Image (cartoon, rainbow, N blue to C red):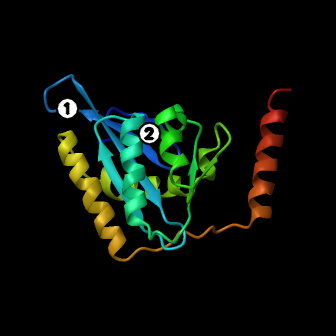
Amino acid sequence: MKINGCPGDIARRAGGELVRVLRLPDVLGDVRAWLALFAALDIKTGTVIGRCHRRHRAVEFRKFLDTIDAAVPPELDIHLVLDNYATHKTPLIRRWLSKRPRFHLHFTPTGASWINLVERWFATLTEKQIRRGVHRSTRALETAIIEYIAVTNEQPRPFRWTKTADEILASVERFCRRISDSRD
C-alpha cells in the first residue's frame, strides 16, 4: 500500500482528532472499500482507544463515543479535540452529549489539523503499520490497525513536543514571509 497521493492512499481526513478514513482496493477488483478509523489519544499516557467502522456517519461516531465513555473512569472529565466535520454536530450527537456533561468538545479552526496531537499518532500508524504492510482486503487492514493499537498500548508513551512555542511561531512567521515574498 502506498501513501501520499498514490493508489490505496489515505483517501481523506474526516474528524481531525478522532477519525481517519482509509481507502484501499477491495479484493473484488475495482470496487473501493472504505474503512473509518476512530481513534482517541490520551495525551497524558499515550494510550489509544480505537475502533474501525465501515462507514463514517453520526451513528458510528456515537458508537465510538460510547466506547470512550466505557473506557474512561467515570470520575474523569473527557475533553475531545475535533475538527468541524458535520458528523460531530448532528442532533444525534448533541442529544448524546447533553446527557453526558463530563464530555467537553473543543473544535480546531478549519485547516488546522496539524494542531491535533493525534495527527502525529496517525502518521506513526501509517509509517510503522500501514506503509510496511500488504493489506489485500479491508479486513486485513482493520486487523493490522487493531493489532498495532494493542501492541502500542502495551507500553504507551506520550508524545512530546520537541520545539518550544516560540520556535514554532518563528518557523510559521518565516514561512509566511517566504510565501508572501514569492508573490512579488
- Between residue 72 and residue 147, name the one nearer to us: 72
Q: Residue 146, how many percent across, how many down? A: 27, 57
Q: Specify whether residue 131 is in view.
A: no
Judged from the image, the secondary structure of the residue bearing numbered disc 2 is: loop
Q: Residue furthest front?
A: 99
64 or 175: nearer the viewer? 64
- Dot placed on the residue nearer the N-terminal end, 2 or 1: 2
- Residue 72 shown left or right of residue 36 in the figure: right
Name the one closer to the observer, 79 or 179.
Answer: 79
Residue 155 lies in quadrant = bottom left
Residue indicated by mark 2: 4
Left or right side of 12 for 28: left
Residue displayed at 65% across by 45% down: 108
On the image, numbered disc 1 is attached to which residue?
Answer: 26
Q: Residue at x 55, y 60 (%)?
A: 102
Q: Name the kind of residue labelled 1 in the image.
A: Asp
Report the quarter where the N terminus lies. Answer: top left
Badge 2 density bin: few <14, some 14–19, many ≥20, Cα 10 Å: few
From the top left corner, tell me how far across and down residue 57 is, in percent: 40, 33
Q: Is residue 95 above or below residue 66?
A: above
Task: List x then y, in percent, for residue 164.
Answer: 73, 67
Image x and y of residue 66, in percent: 38, 53
The circle on residue 90 is none
Q: Given contact means CB atoms under 8 Å apart, are the residues at marks 2 and 1 in contact?
A: no
